Image (spheres, helix red, strand yellow):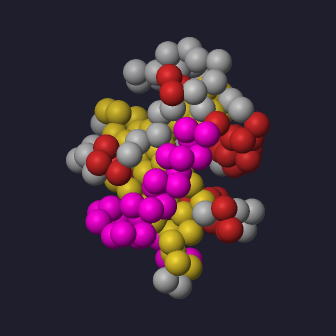
Amino acid sequence: MDIRLDDLSGPEIADFLEQHLQDMRSVSPPESKHALDINDLKRPDILFWTAWLDLELVGCGAIKKLDAEHGEIKSMRTSPAHRGRGIASSLLTHILHEARQRGFRRISLETGAMPFFAPACSLYRQHGFTFCPPFADYAEDPNSLYMSRML
């Protein structure tokens, strides 16, 4: 698998992210949807990676800089056809390594509390994340779970 820093300019990523947003809309009420669209992901405080098997886009993930030492995981997604194959774990390992290299000491994330998100919660727990209170601009929300870990 090839994991690349991505500038979000390719047509594959636009379609991939649109599928991600559609999934989030289908399981999360509008007030609890925190997924970013492609334009928001192009902000200078966000680093975005894609994962490829040969010429096929199979996953993505990002870090949003909250401050000099704290980042947030955003837009983690594995294509439905490739779930359960370790792609998300490899991508998350890569992103955590990059976060350390860039000086982050803490990484946090928000994910859904619905059953759809159970595999994501399991993945994050396997990578050392623990539940925490809302961080940054998040507020208590019965549809959201917040997790964090030190690097």
- Does residue 102 belong to the magenta stretch? no
Magenta-drawn stretch contains 18:
yes
Relative to 45, 91 lies left or right: right
Q: Residue at x 53, y 85 (%)?
A: 54
* Residue at horizontal 76 percent and vertical 37 percent from the top: 115
Magenta residues (range)? 1-26
What secondary structure characterizes most of the magenta part? helix
14 shown above or below 52 = above
Residue 107 visible, this orientation: yes
Residue 117 screen position, x and y as percent: 69, 41
Image point (38%, 46%), residue name: 37
Q: Name the image quarter holding the N terminus.
A: bottom right
Q: Is residue 141 left or right of residue 81?
A: left
Image x and y of residue 141, in percent = 58, 17
Between residue 4 and residue 31, name the one nearer to us. Answer: 31
- Residue at point 47% right, 40% down? 35
Percent from the top left, x then y, of residue 118? 74, 41
Give the tally of numbered discs: 0
